[in-house]
Amino acid sequence: MRILIFIFWGIQISCVLYAQESPEFISLKKYYINLPPKQLTDTNWLISMIDTGGINYLLPIQQAIHREKNKAVIDTPTHRDMLADAICRLTDYRTSLFYEKQSFNPLTSAEQQSIQSLAGLFEKATRTNAASIVYQEAAKHRVTMINASYLKPATYAWISGLLDSLFKLGYKHLAFEIISKTNKPIQQVSLKDGIFITEPAIAECIRKAISIGFQVISCQPDFSLQKPNEIHKLQAAKLGEYIQAQQPNEKCLLITQPGNNALAYGDPEDVPMGVYLSAWLNEKPASFDQCFLTENSINEYGAFLHALLQYKQPVFQATIPQLNGKPLKALEEELYTAMIWHPTTTYTNNRPSWMNLQGWKKEMEIPAAFKNSFLVQAYYLDELSKQKTGTCIPADQTYQAAANGLYYLYLRKGKYRIIYRNKEYAILGYQDIEVNK
């Protein structure tokens, strides 16, 4: 009986761990596979979403399928990562997870048993709303760091829900690693601010911060340097100088890539920026990890742990597990103030529910108004009036229709141009709408 239960449990965990390609993406792949040979904008081993007209969200998919068809993939893991990134920008989250998992290594029995033992601690822990802990710690510090991943836009969507309260706590400055270097705070998002903010939920997080009144700046590392420690030390020094130049009552929120906000290190050749910043400021910032205990995590270990926990005792909101009144750490090192445990994504009308950015945006029904429509995008009319369409980032977009054949986009109050494109990314038509609620 125990063997049967274990087998059943293993089957359930594997179902959670392995997502599948969406029918719409499979349709897109078949379309590109059957295209006659032609010259693509494809000049190196990377796949790119930039063509002569600016952003083309479907171009990297076409490039990737073209390479696979012609057996021209040079670096398979990197190819899969770039493909997952491209699909993520199209908001096909399930398919993005599927390709991200392709690079995972199988876990040994010993590794699985170790993770199952660790899961036992989480099962004993009490669960506290993560936002409440972030606010408590942020109130006690001048600097708060939270990591997020461009492959996990849900992490940015969750941050967007914190911004109003953090602003009221005195946080007036917001630094993003993924924004391209700039000498002054940005006032509007566009392609010039970097390729990594072209995912709609990430762009909307930045737009919300600007609308609240944050001074939004870049803290992108200088990758022209060779050694990780040189990169992180210089990054920390520039951030430290910026923070020290502000009024004492003005606090700073830093959004880093996974790991770079850690307050301790194991590899002396790769010390995180958070360690150097703590030393530079002579104070320890609050620091939160939200990428380890989320779907797919940052590696196969975290992915298995998250899937196991969500199968056995799931959470349904961002949570911080605590033991004896203190945040539970999944790792021995005191890397972070606390680790945030995210729920499994739920879907409404084929869209991730977190696309509403914690209630800031509302689901809007969009009819498929043109024959052969595939990709539906919503652009801000105000942004289109100031820059070319090819440099604008949609407020939302999708190629996944709901079961009723309609598209659903998440939009906030404002004026939009809904653009309909086919599988070649050609514009079939558009309509302007105003959202009043």
Image (cartoon, rainbow, N blue to C red):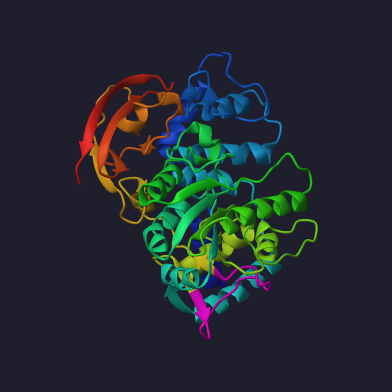
Q: Main secondary structure of the magenta part?
A: loop
Q: Can residue 404 be seen in this view?
A: no
Give the residue at the far bottom of this rendering.
Answer: 324
Which picture quadrant has residue 408? top left
> Is residue 329 one of those drawn in magenta?
yes
Question: Start and end of the magenta stretch?
Answer: 321-338
Give the residue at the far left of this rendering.
Answer: 436
Q: Residue at x 72, y 48 (%)?
A: 231
Residue 226: x percent and y percent? 78, 43
Residue 88: x percent and y percent? 49, 41
Residue 3: x percent and y percent? 57, 73
Which picture quadrant has residue 266? bottom right
Q: Nearer the viewer, residue 43 or 130?
A: 130
Which picture quadrant has residue 223? top right
Does 261 sit above or below residue 81? below
Q: Nearer the viewer, residue 157 or 169?
A: 169
Q: Which residue is drawn at 68% across and 54% down?
A: 237
> Is residue 84 one of those drawn in magenta?
no
Q: Which of 218 and 42 is in front in this view?
A: 218
424 lies left or right of 220? left
Q: Residue at x 43, y 51 (%)?
A: 214
Residue 47: x percent and y percent? 60, 30
Q: Which residue is drawn at 51% across and 79% down?
A: 322
How many numbered marks appear? 0
Does 206 sit above or below residue 163? above
188 lies left or right of 44? left
Q: Is residue 131 visible?
A: yes
